């Protein structure tokens, strides 16, 4: 079995006899558009495979490869995605880019190696801070760059002020011009646009925010 995906220069295999684990791992890789092969623990795995997803209980019969475990992945899918991308793609700066589109509904998107590892719409200030704090604290990236759209400038500054109080040395906060990140009225399409806007913001250089 092979997952449909875009071009990638390194191969991934799922090696497990656990049906539930296989389903979740294969669904994750398909969602990430990463191609994979299936392997049986204890049998030979294609020499071109560089990353194997398996269970902790089967690790000793998988072989000498870079392993990611099902048990760790289901505990934190965002960190798992970041880890997978870090192993498969070159990220010279090793930076997690977090884009925030503030408003009554706030879009949050996190990008790592150019790939989306997190996307969520929040409906309260506290929920926004909780989710961004989670991304900052759980990410293993060397640096985290938080970019906040200035469409609602007062809210943007309030978010920046609260996040800067975390006093993380490897965190940079920027206020970004969010013009040309359009919105629409349909609730479903608006949610997609909020996330699209947050993604654009995450990739757009802004002005550094300094804690007052």
Image: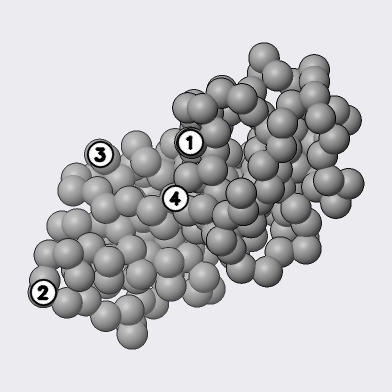
Q: Residues within 10 Å of mark 1 (few under 14, many from 20)?
A: some
Number of numbered discs overlaid on the protein picture: 4
SS assignment at label 4: strand
Q: Nearer the viewer, mark 4 or mark 1?
A: 1
Q: Nearer the viewer, mark 1 or mark 3?
A: 1
Most extreme residue toward the bottom, as rendered?
180
Compared with 210, 54 (above or below) is above
Q: CA distance from mark 1 to mark 3?
A: 31 Å
Residue 123 image position (x, y, % from top left): 18, 48
SS assignment at label 3: helix
Residue underneath mark 3: 126
Q: Are marks 4 and 1 in contact (CB under 8 Å)?
A: no
Residue 96 image position (x, y, % from top left): 58, 53
Residue underneath mark 2: 185
In terms of sequence position, does the residue under pointer 4 or pointer 3 come before the other?
4
The foreground one among 168 and 1 is 1
21 left or right, relative to 140: left
Q: CA distance from mark 4 to mark 2?
A: 24 Å
Residue underneath mark 1: 24
Q: Residue at x 20, y 70 (%)?
A: 189
Residue underneath mark 4: 118
In terms of sequence position, does the residue under pointer 1 or pointer 2 come before the other?
1
Q: Residues within 10 Å of mark 2 (few under 14, many from 20)?
A: few
In terms of sequence position, does the residue under pointer 3 or pointer 2 come before the other?
3
29 left or right, relative to 186: right
In terms of sequence position, does the residue under pointer 4 or pointer 2 come before the other?
4
């Amino acid at each position: 079995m092979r997952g449909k995906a875009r071009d990638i220069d390194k191969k991934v295999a799922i090696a497990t006899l656990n049906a539930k684990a296989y389903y979740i791992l294969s669904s994750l890789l398909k969602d990430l558009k990463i191609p994979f092969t299936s392997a049986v623990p204890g049998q030979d795995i294609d020499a071109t495979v560089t990353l194997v997803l398996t269970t902790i209980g089967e690790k000793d019969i998988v072989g000498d490869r870079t392993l990611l475990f099902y048990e760790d992945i289901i505990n934190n899918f965002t960190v798992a995605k970041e880890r997978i991308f870090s192993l498969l793609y070159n990220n010279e700066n090793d930076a997690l880019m977090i884009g925030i589109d503030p408003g009554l509904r706030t879009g949050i998107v996190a990008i790592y190696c150019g790939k989306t590892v997190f996307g969520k719409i929040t409906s309260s200030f506290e929920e926004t801070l909780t989710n961004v704090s989670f991304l900052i604290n759980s990410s293993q990236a060397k640096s985290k760059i938080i970019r906040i759209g200035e469409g609602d400038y007062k809210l943007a500054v309030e978010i920046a002020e609260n996040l800067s109080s975390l006093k993380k040395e490897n965190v940079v906060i920027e206020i970004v011009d969010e013009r040309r990140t359009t919105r629409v009225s349909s609730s479903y399409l608006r949610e997609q646009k909020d996330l699209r806007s947050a993604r654009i913001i995450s990739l757009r250089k802004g002005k550094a925010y300094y804690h007052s």
